[in-house]
Image (cartoon, rainbow, N blue to C red):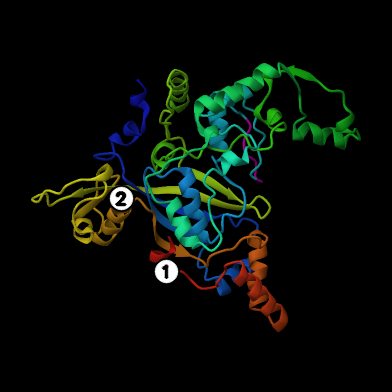
Amino acid sequence: MIKEFTTEELYGSHMRKRPEVLKLELTLDMDGLLNEDMEVLKQYGKVEKGITREILVPADITLHALNYAILRAFGWQNSHLHHFHLPKEVFQKLTGGKNRVDQYDYVEYDGLYTNWMKLCGLYFRFPCDDFEDLYWDDDYKEGQSIKTWFSKKYTGPYKYKGKWEHFHFANPAAQSVLKKNPMIRQQLSFAEWSKLKESGKDPDKMPAKMIPIEEATIQELSYGFEGGMDELLERIPLIELMIPEGIKEDRDINDKIAYLQKRQENEEKDLPVLPVTDELIYAYDYGDGWEVKIRLKECYYTIREDKSESFTEVQEGVRLNLKKDRYLSEQTAFDRNNLKVSKSLALKIATVNYKRRPVCLSLDGLSLMDDVGGIHGYVDLLRTIHGNDPEEKEDMREWAKWMGWTGRMNKPETLL
């Protein structure tokens, strides 16, 4: 039965019950920065080690809701496209790929399209360009408080209304590609393309080789789509997808996922998926190229130790007919090893669980901004604002202010 392979199995030997709150470490990818760039960030961007955020989130927060929390945490305004994807090694393992990621973080996805097709609607989006569906909840109105708008998006209960996110809508689309295109043109790999160029031949003038689509790789099929074939479904709750840091990898995960996929074909509702990774990558604004690495650092559950007085539960068992402060102060929190955490942390964990809303524990670095040119452009902005040209400084400050950047350090408790 599928219940044997849910998160209950993963956490059963570590915790008394399923986690209620997760601690995430969000780290901005700053690979490629020079030492002098880091010095600018340290001197003017209030960066100590890196641009990071440590947050607590409800365990059932969806990737879609987490997107808004990340945007708010780093100072972006939801002005560009985004997606979540797995580390490339994990994607390769799930889809049967054999190629390894190189030193430049590049890999050709050589798993078969037929392998990916079985996971479409289960883990991965069908790469369509239905923007109305992607932005089903983009209801911001001019003049509205952006902070208030964001907070409504990442406060539970969580739902996702996009039709392309559901297995029985997305998976038939993936299967139709197989049926409509029995033969496709085989694309040259980067290695093959480079070899032809080095030998003086024009790869674009080479005769086309047609192959059955069942033999086509994910890389070869990806050329025909606008979106990426590694983009994750955003309806998935985080607790179903991520493994806590330090937990051993499940060697039988592919067999269990195959069983899950077969079961899903016969179920009308979307089934819970299985945790496959201890890291996610969040990509925002493909032009500026922002990327945030997400790691699941710890899991918590709460227990109210003093049960001498009973309390009346109302809507969904979350809101209690009781003074909130007293209720929260009576909660005791435990980590995944069943160790009691400090009283101050327990209060924050209980607050997240009670309000169904993330909180920030710590942050390193000022907020960022949209349309600045990625991390390199942001460093240039700081250089200019703190430079010696009065006119350039004033113009840059005015533009940054207009873009919503204040240059002031946020307090963790007020960030989200």
For marks 2 and 1, the one nearer the N-term is 2
SS at badge 1: loop
Residue neighbourhood size for the residue with mark 2, other residues' Cα within 10 Å, grouped as few (<14), some (14–19), many (≥20): many
Residue neighbourhood size for the residue with mark 1, other residues' Cα within 10 Å, grouped as few (<14), some (14–19), many (≥20): few
Indicate the position of residue 326 as horizontal and vertical percent values. Answer: 19, 60
What is the three-letter code of the residue carrying label 1?
Lys
Indicate the position of residue 325 as horizontal and vertical percent values. Answer: 22, 61
Q: Is residue 34 visible?
A: no
Indicate the position of residue 190 as horizontal and vertical percent values. Answer: 75, 35
- The residue drawn where x is 30% and y is 58% is 348
The residue under label 1 is 411
**Which region of the structure is painted magenta?**
99-104
Q: Residue furthest left?
A: 308
- The residue drawn where x is 44% and y is 37% is 241
Residue 102 on the magenta segment: yes
The residue under label 2 is 353
Indicate the position of residue 300 as horizontal and vertical percent values. Answer: 30, 48
Q: Quadrant of the C terminus?
A: bottom left
Residue 106 on the magenta segment: no
Q: Nearer the viewer, residue 389 or 149?
A: 149
Q: Which of the numbered marks, if any, corresponds to residue 102?
A: none
Q: Quadrant of the N terminus?
A: top left
Please identify the dominant SS of the magenta region: loop
What is the three-letter code of the residue carrying label 2?
Asn
